[in-house]
Image (cartoon, rainbow, N blue to C red):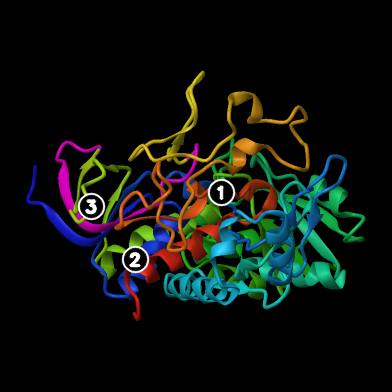
Amino acid sequence: MSTPLRCDLAIIGTGLAGMAAAVFASSRGLSVAQAGSTGAISYTSGVFDVLGALPAVAQGQPARPVERPFEALAELLRDEPGHPYALLDPEDIRLAFHEVMDFLREAGLPYRAGGEKNFLLPTPAGTLKHSWCVPETTLPGCEALAEGAPACIVAIEGMKGFSARQVAVNLAPYWPGLTTARVAMPGHPGGEVYPEQVARMLEVPAARRALAEALAPLVGPARVVGLPAVLGMHRPGDVAADMARLLGRAVFEIPTMPPGVPGIRLKEAFEGLLPGRGVALFCQQKLVGPLPAPGAPFRLRVTGQPVEHEVLADRVLLCSGRFLGGGLGGLRGRPITETVFGLPVAQPEDRSGWYRQDYLDPRGHEVHRAGLRVDAALRPLGPGGAPAHEGLFAAGSILAGQDWIRMKCGAGVAIATAFKAVRAMAPGR
């Protein structure tokens, strides 16, 4: 094993909460070591929700979409007092988002926040999504939808999971007059076409010119052209602007089914820039170790590669996610467990309480609210109800009391709780 790596903070997890925490910590002068699987972030849609829906609280009630997320927080917390947002100042949620947006702009991925209102944008299923912070490449679509402007949705031949006709048919009640087109990707050898493949092709100016020439006769009088999210892997704003210039009309992206290009862009942006900020980033590896005695530093091991590393950290931020990220486990016949330190998990008393009978019940399922209870500084509670360790913090989806699937609050919880936890470690910075 190599010489121990000493740091102020070890971050366990490389999803959105972990990556945002690394941005906040490095900006405040903390030395950081971070490890985790980076698969989950590729499965994000690329849009960042604060609060997109209020789940039903009684049987038979529908979930309600949210237009003004910060106004709706009070209503959410009235019905869901254990939600992590109860520990946050709404203004800190905005500050956290803008700090991450500044980082992403530096990485060539500009985002736009919605002020007091959520943006309304189309999904690849042809439904509408309320989201507070979106990539700028989606904005012309949000604006055209709001205006009812004539638009053409374009599918690419051979690309599975994106049907322009499905989008147009399902959106017809909200966006009348949508037209559709289908185009073969110039230069592609044929067969199945993958979004990431097209995105990398379109980073070449000649490929953009060829696609624009193929598209121009197909889009008719549409003022705006909507494509699946394929407008470049790096600096997509530049690719979108060039396509708009070539077509003589605005273009926008619709996020595709995961894993999609917007999620991969985020993954590559974080992984590309964080090491330059001094973060010791170990991708596709794990940080494991015991919970130390009070006052003692954390002694962790980076595992998953032939050469293991030892990390000595004053503090640890647990951003290991839920079941998909591996932070929670649920073997048959056993209660839900926290997989790194064996911390207590808030959960239904027995497995029969995990799910309601109707899978699509708008109240959601209790298993999706399982997670760690924390104190006001976001330190996980131990068996006795006190913080498990004074230097251990948690952020993101592993926190109990929120159903990010139905509340559409996953990015907000991830970014804002990471912000608060890091500020608790570095007060005044």
Q: Secondary structure at mark 1?
A: loop
* Residue at 60% in and 73% down: 90
Q: Classify 353 as above or below 43.
A: above
Other residues around mark 3 within 10 Å, as few (<14) / some (14–19) / many (≥20): few
Residue 147 x/y as whole percent: 85, 73
Residue 65 x/y as whole percent: 79, 58
* Residue at 56% in and 57% down: 84
| Side of 42 where 81 appears, left or right | right
* Residue 323 sits inside the magenta stretch: yes
Decide which of 53, 372 is in the foreground and name it: 372
The nearer-to-camera label among 3 and 1 is: 3
Quadrant where the C terminus is found in the figure: bottom left
Distance in Å between CA atoms under marks 3 and 1: 43 Å
Residue 260 is labelled as: 1
Res. 306 image quadrant: top left
* Residue 238 sits inside the magenta stretch: no
Q: Secondary structure at mark 3?
A: loop
